[in-house]
Amino acid sequence: MTGIAYEPHELMITRIAAEITEVPEHVVVMGSFTPLAYAAYMLARMTQAPDAWMIGYNAIGVLPIELSFAGTEGAIYKGSLASGSFVENGNVVHLNTRGLLECVSSAQMDGSGAINLSVIGPYDHPKVRLPGGAGAPEVIQNYRKVVAYFAQHDARTLVSEVDFVTGRRTPVAAEARSAKGLVGGPIIVVTPKAVLRKDDEGPFRVESVTRGIDVQDVVDSTGFSLQIPDVTPYTVEPTSEQLTLLRDQIDPFCTARFDFLKGPERLDYLAAILAKEWDRARSQLTSTDEA
């Protein structure tokens, strides 16, 4: 135990960052702005994987930046080495390149590893119509590994069977994937309670649990069966260096906490962060004018 206080999103960021390695093994791909996943990439770049490559927003070769809701996209393009259209990046990266990693988060995931970003309830008469998968089906099928993260660990999110299969990694076992010309690699699920891992067609295995969480709590909160090892370690906790980088340089506005909020809370939180961002921008403009 590190003895350093941290929040659930910080633990998840550092665990995801551990999966990011340097070229040529992995090119990391991010879609639209998902603060927690972007923070994990920035942390990896600033620690164990300084030469890792990232594609985000269609910008190629993204450098570490400070995250914000108003400025992230502009900063990513400004510091990148190149850019390409969605179609170009899709053809080259999603369908043609090997050795990739992308973080995904969905409304539901089941024990087969299928994700649902489409509907809750029957497709023709859903309770909720979701945004859809965009490139998610290609991502989870073709990449070297899938890292899925969820702000909630409960049976409504990790379900026995998804309401609609937006995408699925099939087969999962490395040998079976190789026989089909696909690269092998696991499905890793990161939540505030645990890290789950799936290397074949069998059940997800509990890789680790968050300190203070009982293994039985993880089992009771999951809608599908799990393999439980004889000894379950704790998820590696953030170091003081990692927390300092996250809080002072990578995500000083704490945008990554946004994923853990619901409905009206999100609107209020977003408004507060945008106000802080604009206040800082105004103060910088004032300082420049005075100089």
Image (spheres, helix red, strand yellow):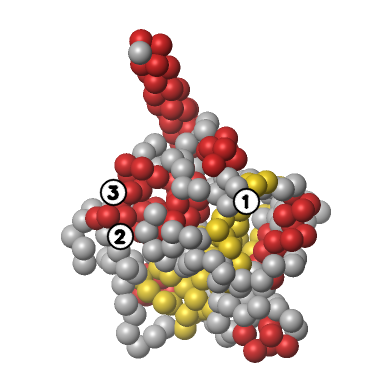
In the image, what residue type sits under mark 1?
Ile
Establish if 105 lies above or below 177.
above
Dot 1 falls on a residue whose secondary structure is strand
Real-space Cα distance between discs 3 and 2? 10 Å
Residue 211, position as x, y percentages in the image = 28, 67
First in residue order: circle 2 vs circle 1? 1
Whichever of callouts 3 and 2 sits on the residue coming sooner in the sequence is: 2
SS under mark 2? loop
| Residue assigned mark 3 | 244
Q: Residue at coordinates 33% horizontally, 49% vertically from top-left? A: 245
Q: Amino acid at mark 2?
A: Pro
Give the spatial CA distance, label 3 vs label 1. Answer: 27 Å
Q: Residue at x 43, y 22 (%)?
A: 281
Instruction: Tell me the CA gap for discs 2 and 1.
Output: 28 Å
> 48 or 32, which lies in front?
48
Choose mark 2 or mark 1, whichever is in front: 1
Residue at 66 percent of width and 78 percent of height: 183
Q: Which residue is mark 1?
A: 60
Residue corresponding to mark 2: 238
